Amino acid sequence: DTGVSQDPRHKITKRGQNVTFRCDPISEHNRLYWYRQTLGQGPEFLTYFQNEAQLEKSRLLSDRFSAERPKGSFSTLEIQRTEQGDSAMYLCASSLGGQGSQPQHFGDGTRLSIL
Amino acid sequence: DQQVKQNSPSLSVQEGRISILNCDYTNSMFDYFLWYKKYPAEGPTFLISISSIKDKNEDGRFTVFLNKSAKHLSLHIVPSQPGDSAVYFCAASVSSWGKLQFGAGTQVVVTP
């Protein structure tokens, strides 16, 4: 059983650069979520897809952030003109939609460090 | 606005004893609650969940209790094992498919 896969695991970049992260959900899962986690805090919701449709975005997701899930499978999260405050762990989760309660399953995240 | 709170940042328990982790929430619309466990450099791993129509759910050594009137849930781990040493997060959502709101986590250390 392949879990949620995220790439890269760690990204170091200079302030002002653009970065893109990829998430591959569990294959049969139609829902995909992005979260951000900073030290000492729990994950914070960023955005969520059902299939290819982006259904909700947090106010945390500024104009510099964009997420896509073009074919309803993998997703990308891009941050343009990175800032020091963007340094965090970016987590992807997926779940199976349908009847009943289905938990979200997380990948191991991409740690972003802004120099 | 922190709608899910874990007021104990850390918990130390002896191996074999019971670990009790607590979580409080403020949003009465939450109807699905989960516990996750996280090791360093890994993502959160789902442990157990409960919907608001129940007050208890059990899975092996893990039991979650929900007190809707008090807006409180707890996770019991019995017996505690060294491999249980991790950060535990409480999470809640409005419906089972919605975004999760997390507490800040409780670091559990199980000592021999």
Image (spheres, rainbow, N blue to C red):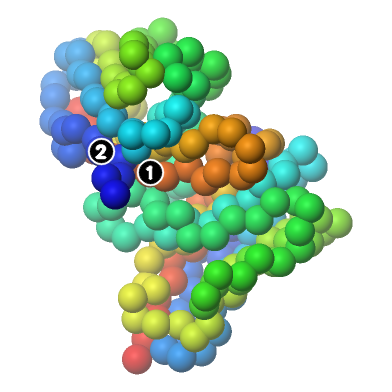
Figure disc tally: 2
Please tell me whether residue B74 is drawn above or below residue A71 in the rendered image: below
- Identify the residue at horizontal 51%, vertical 51% (top origin): B104
Residue A106 bears which disc, if any?
Answer: 1
The answer as to whether the residues below labels 2 and 1 share one chain is: yes
- Any part of residue B90 in sight: yes
Q: Which of A33 and B8 is in front in this view?
A: A33
* Image quarter (top left, top right, bottom left or bottom right) of the N terminus of chain B: top right
Q: Nearer the viewer, residue A51 or B28?
A: A51
Q: Residues within 10 Å of mark 1 (few under 14, many from 20)?
A: many
Residue located 54% across and 16% down the image: A55
In this rendering, the answer to whether A56 lies above or below B93 is above
Residue B64: x, y in percent? Answer: 63, 66
Name the residue nearer the viewer: A45 or A26: A26
Measured in 3D between alpha carbons, the distance from the residue under mark 2 to the one under mark 1, in whole angstroms, is 9 Å
Parent chain of label 2: A
How busy is the neighbourhood of tag 2: few (under 14 within 10 Å), some, or many (20 plus)? many
Image x and y of residue A88, in percent:
31, 36
The residue shown at (30%, 45%) is A3
Q: What residue type is labelled 2?
A: Ser
Question: Is residue B58 found left or right of B45 in the rendered image?
Answer: right
Marks 2 and 1, the one that precedes in the sequence:
2
**Residue at horizontal 48 percent and vertical 13 percent from the top:** A53
Residue bearing the label numbered 2: A5
